[in-house]
Every structure is written in C-alpha cells, then in structure tokens.
Image: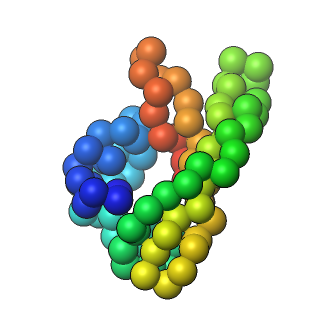
Amino acid sequence: MIDADYQAAHGMLAADGQAMFPDGQALADDFFLTIGASTVTGTETTSVTPTVGESDLDVRDLVTFDLDTDVGTVGFSVQVCEEAADLTICAYR
C-alpha cells in the first residue's frame, strides 16, 4: 500500500479477501477508510504474535505496524496465514 501498488496488495490477500474486493483499488479504498488516512509514507513493524484460530491447524501470525500517514501515526494489524503453501493476508484491522 505504501508504494500505491494496490493490485500487488490485492494479490497478497487470501482467496476470501480477493473475492471480497474485486480489484486493488477496492482494497485500497477499504484500507484507507479503515485507517482513517489517505496516504502512507512509512511503516514500522512493532510486533509479531503467533495466534491459533478455530483449530490447532489454523495458526496465524498477528503482525502489528505503526503506519506513518497524513494524519499522524496509526496502529494497524494484519493476520498472516498459510494458504496453498503461500503466506497470505487473511484479515486486517
């Protein structure tokens, strides 16, 4: 998102997320609405925490960032999961 390559970001979503957003621009619109900003100029990873989902097989990492934006620093988290042997973004908030 920082490089405005929204289609590449869309490609990093899990299949459910790709189905939710028809293209990279739709993802970007939701992302910027979620963080309450219109640009991201930098990021810093603040933590990586393993979590377990609904079953022991549903292991995800919660990765938390501080985003430098046009409205100041914004905290943001993504859940990273493995899907078909690829690491994908399966949720964000």
Asked if 14 appears above or below 57 in the picture, the reply is below
Total of numbered circles in the picture?
0
Left or right of 77 on screen, residue 29: left
> Residue 11 appears at what percent x and percent y?
30, 40
> Residue 55 appears at what percent x and percent y?
75, 24
Which residue lies at the image location 55% right of the left edge and 54% below the top edge? 44
Q: Visible in this render: residue 89?
A: yes
Asked if 38 appears above or below 28 in the picture, the reply is below
Q: Quadrant of the C terminus?
A: bottom right
> Residue 85 appears at what percent x and percent y?
45, 15
Left or right of 64 on screen, residue 41: left
Q: Nearer the viewer, residue 44 or 51?
A: 44
Which residue lies at the image location 56% right of the left edge and 36% below the top edge? 80
Q: Residue furthest bottom?
A: 71
Asked if 4 appears above or below 63 in the picture, the reply is below
Q: Nearer the viewer, residue 62 or 24?
A: 62
Asked if 84 appears above or below 92 in the picture, the reply is above
> Residue 59 appears at what percent x and percent y?
68, 26
